[in-house]
Amino acid sequence: MHTLGINAAFHDPAACLVSDGRVVAAAEEERFTHIKHGKRPVPFSTWELPFHAIDFCLRQAGLTIKDIHHVAYSFDPYLLLPKEYSESVPLSLKVGPQPPPPGFNSVWEPLFLASILHAPGHLCDGWPHHLQARLRGVCTDKQPFRWHWVPHHLAHAASAFHVSPFPRAAVMTLDGRGEKATTGYAVGDGNQLRWLGQVEMPHSLGILYESVTGYLGFLHSCDEYKVMALASYGQPKYLRDFREIVQLGENGQYTIGELKLEERFGPPRLRGADIEQKHYDIAASLQVVLEETVLELARWLHEETKEPDLCLAGGVALNCVMNARLRDDGPFHRLWVQPAAGDAGTALGAALWVDTQERGAQERSCTMNHAYLGPAFNDMEIEAFLSWTKVPFRQLKNVAEETADLLVQNKIIGWFQGRMEFGPRALGARSILASPIHPNMQARLNEIKDREDFRPVAPVVLEEEAGKWFVGADRSPFMLFVHQVQPDKAERIPAVRHVDGTARIQTINHQQCPRLYDLLKAFQARTGVPVLVNTSFNTRGEPIVCTPRDAVECFWTSPLDALVIGSYLLEKPSA
């Protein structure tokens, strides 16, 4: 049975293919279109289907749309209908084909949610038949697949639990917004999710963080990770303000009061203006209150479920500092965070949810041990492209050893290997790699990528060596938690040590990514350091590279020293 999952609701449109419980492929649309987060300067175009990502998923499995049995869309517009209609779709999270509501011609019209969001309770005629036209257009016979609306936070929850290593677990979703929910609670058992409750709009930790991100002069819904980095440079001097804004209630509820950011903190920072100490302190205060609030929500959920383990998803779960606080101070024994925790991951969650419901499977079919679910290019394809470009290149006899020699020379390497990562983190398939030994490497990388000076770069470390270099580290393959750098190692890897002494680590073993593992071993043999800087292979304004063409263009339009692409090396001539 083949299930195609789609996210195309707010941002980060993506597609995922699940076949009989196994995740075959997943990718974000931005990697193909070069439009970051899928956001176009056109009203409502973020609801555009991820055509390129769907095409990739189908090609990866050798399928066409006629072979698909179910399409799972990670948004349920029925939940936004006026009360007299929405009551027919209870919050039991039932999904599946449903008849059109009164006044509508088709249930294939998710774009109508845009108008509902802007004019609640108002129904109009003549909604565009967007999905129907795009997906039915490839079929000449009867519609081959069934359509399923999957509530947004249920899709987040399924993306976290159904591929986690836990047979049972509590589940918490933390997002900006869904149809109505902003935070959700569930308990997973086997292949079932039992919904416990939710917090609804306008009360949203994600929207609070977005609002402060905008106030601090960054792009909301895009740059929240910058505010997290900014917080490390500040002192939480405005805790009283944010504690007034966020009020905890009972049973996992909270409210967000009036922000009044300008009244509280003065005029907002203009984009590109200097960052003042006040801005650092606002970011630090926001981060502390976010952590405090999520800790209390987790304590309620733990008491409610009695489960020892917790799964997390939703865009807020990409806050690795918060995750580390929850790991260290929270009530749960173990945490697992979906690496594509943002909205792109709901394509995966929707597909997994529908797959398990339709197959009636009782046992888990897969665990997400890695995130390499995107396109790959073999050496024959890479060599053919490089030859066509007429750029000078050569084939490496030993990729790991020869690349390690370049890194020891303090060269910065574009690294393009195997299947592309799913999710926002570069995890060694589409990465920029460098030595962590030189203190100026962070500044060099930020200059190459045209990033703010305060932005840290992250390390990748051999899994078996992680605990020796980072406090309490064991297995952490997705860069979703921070750890303190071991005091006796701090001077040896200064480039990856943030101002607060932490690092957002990725661990790697040979099974996950053999060529990157071998490179780390080769670098360790030369330097005694089993760590490399690993940052995403892109420059400002561009998503992570996807194809050999993307990699070569990024290499020649940036100050990178070399590109290792498959088994081939491109170097720039010395000055």
Image (cartoon, grey):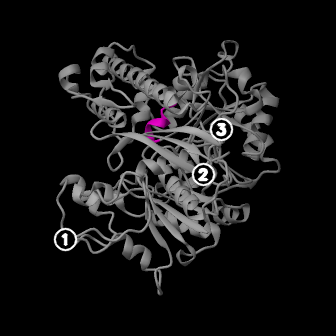
Residue annotated with mark 1: 125
Q: Secondary structure at mark 3?
A: loop
Does 115 sit left or right of 444 as displayed?
A: left
The answer to whether mark 3 and mark 1 are in CB contact below 8 A is: no
Q: Nearer the viewer, mark 3 or mark 1?
A: 1
| Residue range corresponding to the magenta coloring | 314-320
Residue at x-position 18% and y-position 66%: 124
**The C terminus lies in quadrant:** top right
Q: Secondary structure at mark 1?
A: loop
| Amino acid type shown at disc 2 | Asn
Q: Earlier in the sequence, mark 3 or mark 1?
A: 1
Calculate the distance from the C-alpha at mark 3 to the C-alpha at mark 1.
49 Å
| Amino acid type shown at disc 3 | Pro
Calculate the distance from the C-alpha at mark 1 to the C-alpha at mark 2.
40 Å
The answer to whether residue 236 is above or below residue 379 is: above
Q: In the image shown, does 459 or 555 lie closer to the viewer?
A: 459
Residue 144: image x %, image y %? 50, 78
Q: Tag on residue 289?
A: none
Verify whether residue 319 appears in magenta: yes
> Few, some or many C-alpha atoms within 10 Å of disc 3 (few <14, some 14-19, many ≥20)?
many
Verify whether residue 92 appears in magenta: no
Residue annotated with mark 3: 477
Residue 142: image x %, image y %? 46, 84
The reply to whether residue 42 is in sight is: no
